[in-house]
Every structure is written in structure tokens, then in C-alpha cells.
Amino acid sequence: MASRSGLVVFEDSFPTMLERLGEEGFMRELCNGFRLLRDEKREVITFESLKKNSALLGLQGMSDEELRCMVREGDLDGDGCLSEMEFCTLMFRLSPALMQTSKELLEEAIVSSRC
């Protein structure tokens, strides 16, 4: 992560992690990240738990509004927090390289199903 002109810029290291860890290892790491950030009692990531635990992942420079935006971005069911599935989905969506790979695999599957 780097900061330019007050903007937080993330380096997409997920493709490298996926290559090194394999699919199962990568998913374990995503789940470990979720557990680090979650509220222990509610077992979901809340704004409060993200604010409290984000420094563990090098996000200590983020404002409250940026943290709230992260939760809103991934909150698919509108309950104001992130489940493990919502967190993992958000992490994939934020990785341009993983999204491109997913798109290519989907297109390949569609073409194969037509044959």
C-alpha cells in the first residue's frame, strides 16, 4: 500500500499470492484476513472492528470515511457489516488481475458449453 496526494493506493499482490499458495492456500489466507478483522462476538466485520484491527494489515492511515466506504462497498445484503463470503467477494472484486482471470475462465466455459 502506498499513499499519493492523500489517496490510498493498493498494490495488487493477490495474483502472486495465488501463484505461490495455490487456490486452497490463498483462500485460507483470505479467511485468516477475515478473522483478523472481524468482531469476535458478532463474527462479522463491522466498521468498529475494521477500525480497531485494520492496523494489523497496514491500513492504519485510513480515515473513518474510507473504512466506512470499504464496509459499504462489500455489504451485499445491506446489514451494515461484512460476512466472510462478502469479504472474500470484495477482495476478489478489488483485484483487477483476479477479475480478469475470472472473466477469461467464464468466457472459456461459455464457449466450451456451446460446442
Image (cartoon, helix red, strand yellow):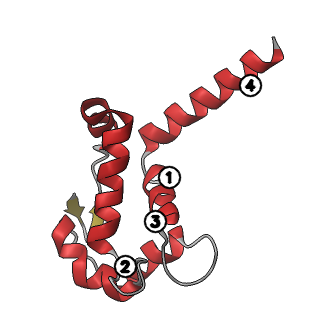
Determine which of the numbered discs, if any, sits on residue 67 in the image: 2
Cα gap from disc 3 to disc 4, whole angstroms: 28 Å
Residue ID at (51%, 61%): 85
The image position of residue 74, as x and y in percent, is 52, 68
Q: Which residue is mark 1?
A: 93
Q: Position of residue 76 (x, y in %)?
A: 61, 70
Is 32 placed above or below 53 here?
above
* Circle 1: residue type: Arg
Q: CA distance from mark 2 to mark 1?
A: 17 Å
Q: Nearer the viewer, residue 103 or 18?
A: 18
Q: CA separation, marks 3 and 2?
A: 17 Å
In percent of width and height, residue 9 lies at: 29, 58
Q: Is residue 43 above or below residue 88?
A: below
With 35 as the anchor, is 43 left or right in this view? right
Kind of residue sitting beneath label 2: Leu
Residue at position x 44%, y 54% from top?
Answer: 94
Residue at screen point 42% across, 55% down: 91
Label 4 and label 2: CA atoms lie apart by 37 Å
Q: Secondary structure at mark 3?
A: helix
Question: Tag 2 or tag 3, which sits nearer the N-term?
Answer: 2
Mark seen at residue 84 = 3
Q: Quadrant of residue 35?
A: bottom left
Earlier along the polypeptide chain: callout 4 or callout 1? 1
Residue 61 showing in the rendered view: no
Q: What numbered label is drawn on residue 110? A: 4
Dots 2, 1 in contact, CB < 8 A: no
User: Would residue 84 be visible to someone looking at this image?
Assistant: yes
